[in-house]
Amino acid sequence: MSIRTILRGTGKILITAGVLVLLFVAYELWGTNIIASNHQSALRQQFNRELHSHGVTTTPTTTSTTAPGSTTTLPTKAVQAAAAPPAEGQPVGEIQIPAIGADFVVVQGTDTADLERGPGHYLGTALPGNPGNAAIAGHRTTYLRPFYNLDALKPGDPIFITTVQGRFQYSVTDTQVVSPDDTAVLNPTATPTLTLTTCNPRYSASTRMVVQAALVTPVVAAAPVKKVPPARLKAAAADLAGGQGDWTGALLWGLVVAAAGFGVWWMWRWRRRWWVPVAGVLPLLVLLFFFFGALNPLLPAGY
């Protein structure tokens, strides 16, 4: 085998690897938005049904507290009685931050699958509007990037959260940056507090940005909170949906993509028709989408 042949083969491998990296970056920045958008649409419908089932009359309306072009349902009657916390992955409520145009349904839990659906409520912390510390995590640059502009919040900026217990307003009091393993910001508080956490800086997970806000509206009856082992809470705060995937699934999808790519290449070598690679591109992109979806949770952090 000549040096030229080796160099040509190496070049093709490097080009292929470069294209795959670029496609993965595109998946992270735009593909994850498609996944989260579909989840948010379903969660919003489910949450609106839950508001009605708890006796909260809602009126669809577009307000200044929502992101541009979004429509939300605001309660016209609050239910103050304590309600059982939702199951993991189910809607907790709707968070609206007018200063940064954020309007998302919050889910219960902060595992990989939870944060792919939207901002996640830390298990073991108080529910919004209740006594204590209600903590919520959200992605900074992927999955609709709910907390992308969290650093733009200033003291006094309002944050609105709607749950089956009513609509609550918080006022931003402090912003800080802490290490990923600092879970003190999730500790119970003597006064009703809202804590928002996200990766920092953007496109990195070296630190955590934390925004805290004080409850402005009256506190409501406390819902029962299930105790969470400190080790799990620390892991959730440190990881923010990192390293929680399944290597088996990612490997199988990788083998499927490799087999499909080899099949397209072999057909092209055999037939030499222009339509062979064209016809093979779309199926390959679809398979890559699922492969990247299985690969993404294996990364150190979900950003």
Image: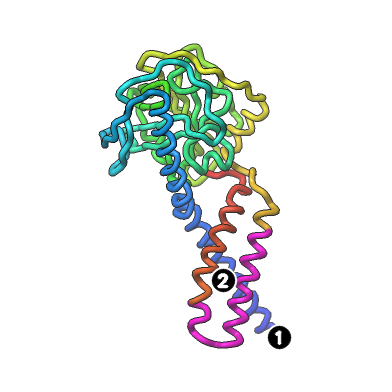
Q: Nearer the viewer, residue 297 or 92?
A: 92
Q: Is residue 171 visible?
A: no
Identify the magenta region. 252-278
How many C-alpha atoms fall within 10 Å of the one at disc 1: few (<14), some, or many (≥20)?
Answer: few
Question: Which tag is nearer the camera, tag 2 or tag 1?
Answer: 2
Residue 17 visible within the image: yes
Name the residue located 47 percent from the left edge and 25 percent from the top edge: 195
Looking at the picture, does residue 58 appear above or below residue 278?
above
Q: Is residue 150 left or right of residue 9?
A: left
Magenta residues, dominant SS class: helix
Q: Nearer the viewer, residue 152 or 123?
A: 123
Dot 2 or dot 1: first in sequence order is 1
Tag shown at residue 47: none
Mark 2: amino acid: Ile
- Residue 254 within the magenta-colored segment of the rendering: yes
Q: Residue 62: horizontal and vertical position, in percent?
A: 26, 37
Question: Badge 2 is on which residue?
Answer: 15
Question: Where does label 1 land, which residue?
Answer: 2
Residue type at numbered disc 1: Ser
Outermost residue on the right side: it is: 1
**Residue 182 quadrant:** top right
Q: Which residue is pictured at 40% across the width and 39% down the height? A: 45
What crowding class fits label 2: few (fewer than 14 Cα within 10 Å), some (14-19), or many (20 or more)? few
SS category of the residue bearing label 1: loop
Alpha-carbon span between mark 2 and mark 1: 20 Å
* Residue at position x 50%, y 53% in the image: 28
| 233 sits to left or right of 138 | right
